[in-house]
Image: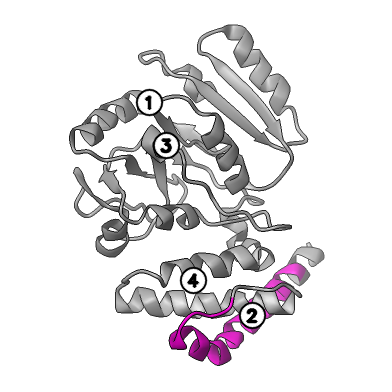
Amino acid sequence: MDALTAQTEVVLDWLVIDDGSDDETKSLVGSYIALGRYPISYVKVLHGGKHRALNEGFGRAYGDWILIVDSDDMITVGGIKCVFSEIRQAERLGAKIIQLPLVVPKAQRQYSFVSPNRAITIGQRFIEEPSFDASLVFGKALMHYRFPEFDGEFFLAESALLFQMINEPVYLSNYVAVTAEYQSDGLSANMRRNRMTSSLGSSHVYQQQLRFKLPANARLRALANFGRFWWHSILRGKRPRSPVGLQQWLVLPAAISFTLIDIVAENCSDRKKSKK
């Protein structure tokens, strides 16, 4: 939050959704409210995962644009000013969402868009550009979209929301407004386990992707992952959505091997952790 207080060249509102934290988040936010530099709203909700926190935020946001900043993200120097500049470009091109590369300083490889400074549909973005984590800026026109929620599950990939917006225009920019320092116990570091334990949502994400025209390699990957997490749901006593179409049924016998590999890998990881 210190990085946000340093953004003195722009006017903004903060909306903090506290996803059931058990630390000093409330008092920390209170100290920033006391400074009076920006309007700050603080909302604490029961722990439900990032996607539920975002749903809560979408329902409460009242600005024309909203930049999503996670707890392990940091705004770059001049980052908010950069976002405001890109908003003007997006509005000029009729885009309702902006994506900017999310830089992870400690990562060996950094990603950027091949053809930036243009507005295309979300569907085209998935086909024409590499897949990587991006900072998201949503226009007010998209605030009615919501992540689906699955009882007892606390993780859902952002693509579950983006694929609902498949025909919406997105502006691609290679400016960097946010950097991330992924934590050892964070979502990214535990992606496989998160998707396994939230298998209904995971299988839903890939089944949703299969509704659209995908490049051959992306379609094969989505089919394999749909079957993979469909089986995780079955093995956990859940009731996943039925396969749709012949391809989704045919992938199931082979996909169970990926499910078993996940289970073995996580068991090995648990044993390593227990020995430390």
Residue 231's disc is 2
Q: Earlier in the sequence, mark 1 or mark 3?
A: 1
How many neighbours does mark 3 have within 10 angstroms: few (below 14), some (14-19), or many (20 or more)? many
| Residue 103, quarter of picture | top left
SS for callout 2: helix
- Contact flag, marks 4 and 2 (Cβ < 8 Å): no
Residue 99 shown left or right of residue 243 in the figure: left
Q: Position of residue 66 (x, y in %)?
A: 43, 32
Q: CA distance from mark 3 to mark 4?
A: 30 Å
Q: CA distance from mark 1 to mark 3?
A: 9 Å
Q: Residue at x 32, y 54 (%)?
A: 122
As drawn, 14 above or below 54: above
Depth order, front residue of 61/159: 61
Residue beneath disc 3: 178
Q: Position of residue 192 (x, y in %)?
A: 60, 66
Q: Which corner quadrant holds the N terminus?
A: top right
Q: CA distance from mark 4 to mark 2?
A: 13 Å
How many neighbours does mark 1 have within 10 angstroms: few (below 14), some (14-19), or many (20 or more)? many
- Identity, as a three-letter code, of the amino acid under mark 3: Val
Residue beneath disc 1: 80
Residue beneath disc 4: 207
Residue 275 shown left or right of residue 214 in the figure: right
Residue mark closest to the camera, 4 vs 2: 4
Residue mark closest to the camera, 3 vs 4: 4
As drawn, 50 above or below 29: below
Q: Is 26 inside the magenta-drawn segment?
A: no
SS for callout 4: helix
- Identity, as a three-letter code, of the amino acid under mark 1: Ile
